[in-house]
Amino acid sequence: MSSVAGKFRQLDNWFGSDMKFHRLYPTPIRQLARRHWTPISIAKLAAGFLVPDNGVRVLDIGSGVGKFCLCAAHYKPFASFYGIEQRKELVEHAETAKSILGLDNVTFAHGNFTQLDLSKYDHFYFYNSFFENLDSTDKIDDTIFYSESLYDYYNRYLYKQLEGMPAGTRVATCCSLDDEIPPDYQLINSSDDRFLKFWMKI
């Protein structure tokens, strides 16, 4: 077996199931997976929508341990994926997983998405990371400040940024109330349970 074939076989093993993929992370992170990380099946569908052409740049807003970006990068090797995450520890876990997988079309950054110029990206993935700011919702940890006012601020900020994007911009949302999506984005498709939704600016 060639080294290239061997590499792809090894990658297929990691992406064979969510349980296998989660072995890239330490046990405390695995315990958060069911509630907070994107399932591989969802990541694959979202990547298929967000990458209509080779060479596009996709931003994951609140990328956590990088699962969506890593899965999407595996299935769409001719696109570039970027993750922005407030928690430095989670970014470090994402970088470790990226190194193990050997993916070179993924970039992770530690910071707040409001610090980014979203016009530098073509399309967006959003697994509603703002929900943590609402009372009675599960939190990943207590390392960042939470408040309902932050929830409102982040929603308004994302809404405004998406308003300024050009026609054809695509957004995939998971577990979202859609109040961050401007009215000039058309709902193209959704999963039967409406957990995953695909939007395009018209």
Image (spheres, helix red, strand yellow):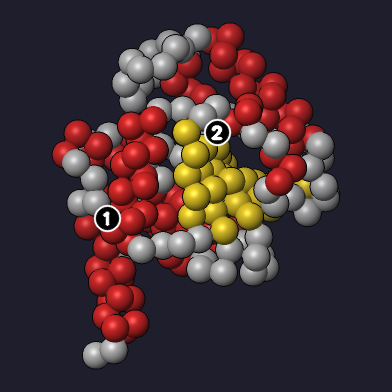
Q: Residue 199 vs residue 25: left or right?
A: right
> Which image quadrant is residue 93 in?
top left
- Residue at 29% x, 58% y: name it: 100
Tell which tag, 1 or 2, sits nearer the viewer.
Answer: 1
Q: Report the front residue among 168 and 56.
A: 56
Q: Position of residue 166 (x, y in %)?
A: 82, 47
Q: Is residue 162 above or below residue 112?
A: below
Q: Position of residue 179 (x, y in %)?
A: 66, 27
Q: Residue 107 vs residue 142: left or right?
A: right
Q: Is residue 166 above or below residue 140?
A: below
Amino acid carrying mark 2 in the image: Ser
Which residue is outermost to the bottom?
A: 1
Q: Is residue 19 above or below residue 15?
A: above
State the separation of the CA atoms marked 1 and 2: 24 Å
Q: Position of residue 25 (x, y in %)?
A: 24, 45
Q: Tag 2, which secondary structure?
A: loop
Q: Which residue is mark 2?
A: 176
Q: Counting other residues with Cα less than 10 Å from the Cα at mark 2, is it few (<14), some (14-19), or many (20 or more)?
A: some
Amino acid carrying mark 1 in the image: Phe
Q: Which residue is mark 1?
A: 21
Q: Tag 1, which secondary structure?
A: helix
- Residue at 30% x, 70% y: name it: 12
Q: Report the front residue among 151 and 69.
A: 69
